[in-house]
Image (cartoon, rainbow, N blue to C red):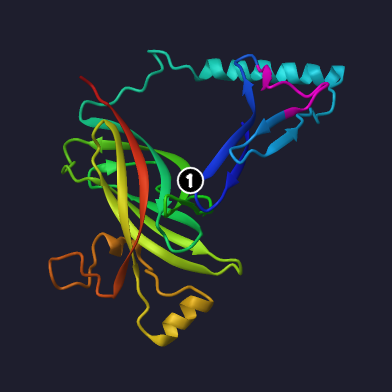
Amino acid sequence: MAALFFEDSSSIEEIDLCFLQVDDHGTLTVIPDFTKRKSYFFINSRSETFEYEIENASNILKGSAIQRERNLMKKIELYKKKLKVTEDDFIKIPPEMLLCIANFEIVSAKNFSSSDIFIHYLIVIPKGCSSENTLEGVTETCTCKTLNGSTVAYYGYTFSLEVLVNILEFTGESLKIIFEVTSIDYWGNFRNEGYGYGDLMLTPGMTVHDIYTWKIEPTTIKNKLQNFFIGGVPHLNDLFYIIDPKETKDSQLSKYGVQTTTSGIITFKSFIIQQRQS
């Protein structure tokens, strides 16, 4: 889809210009069609009139190129057929094991102080569980937009995880996901904008999580000036400290031993299914 956005201090308006759709046979459909005689017009909420055209800028394929494209489509169809899982190909799990397949989506980051931010995540597997997937990743950098008085960055970043659980060794502890939010300014300086973590029970279903974050507040004049002009301080070297601050003497884990301040909110979704022998 191609759209045109109009934004001011009070509202945001989106005008759809055209839609592109490809069916299972590889046919491309353009709605509305490429401009032939008359241009297209639309009027926005401000009574402004716009004229636009849709042009096919692709080079016309010759006979040999068309044949190569058809051969490629045939290979893709054969590959799709190989991916179809049959009963004989289905992976069977031992009776003492449980397979959890989790799909995650980092939806948005809200009310952070900087405009261009990205999210670093780290997954902690509990005892009795194992996974061959990558347990760490970084989203793209998104620019915040103002919506209803709040600054929001939308990501739509998805990742998957397969966790094999040994029922005999599993203690019922939840899976944990740690978040670190970082901003980058015009000069390429990085600043920490927040830390947080969430508990994920390996229970089938879809859940929406709101993770409230905090960040370390610089206390000395030197650190304040350094963080303002070039960034980089203060930050944690070990992200596991967010879950279990090892240097704290009291049992209250909210005491991180440093001066902190409330930061923004990360929203993400989890979709979990389980497979085991009945």
In this rendering, is residue 269 above or below 88?
below
Q: Quadrant of residue 260?
A: bottom left
Q: Position of residue 154 (x, y in %)?
A: 47, 46
Which residue is the extreme one toward the front? 47
Q: Position of residue 95 (x, y in %)?
A: 21, 26
Horizontal arrangement in the rendering, residue 212 relative to residue 229 (left or right)? left
In this rendering, is residue 187 above or below 69?
below
Q: Quadrant of residue 189?
A: bottom right
Q: Which residue is mark 1?
A: 155
Q: Residue at x 41, y 44 (%)?
A: 106
In this rendering, is residue 90 above or below 101?
above
Dominant secondary structure (helix, strand or loop) of the stretch shown in magenta: loop
Look at the numbered disc 1 and give the secondary structure of its residue: strand
Q: Position of residue 59 (x, y in %)?
A: 84, 28
Q: Position of residue 56 (x, y in %)?
A: 79, 27
Magenta stretch holds residue 181: no
Horizontal arrangement in the rendering, residue 194 relative to residue 276 (left or right)? right
Q: Residue at x 75, y 34 (%)?
A: 51
Find the magenta span and give its range: 26-40
Magenta stretch holds residue 35: yes
Q: Toward the viewer: 247 or 229?
A: 229
Q: Toward the viewer: 74 or 4?
A: 4
In this rendering, is residue 113 above or below 105?
below
Q: Quadrant of residue 23?
A: top right
Q: Toward the viewer: 66 or 33?
A: 33
| Quadrant of the drawing holding the C terminus | top left
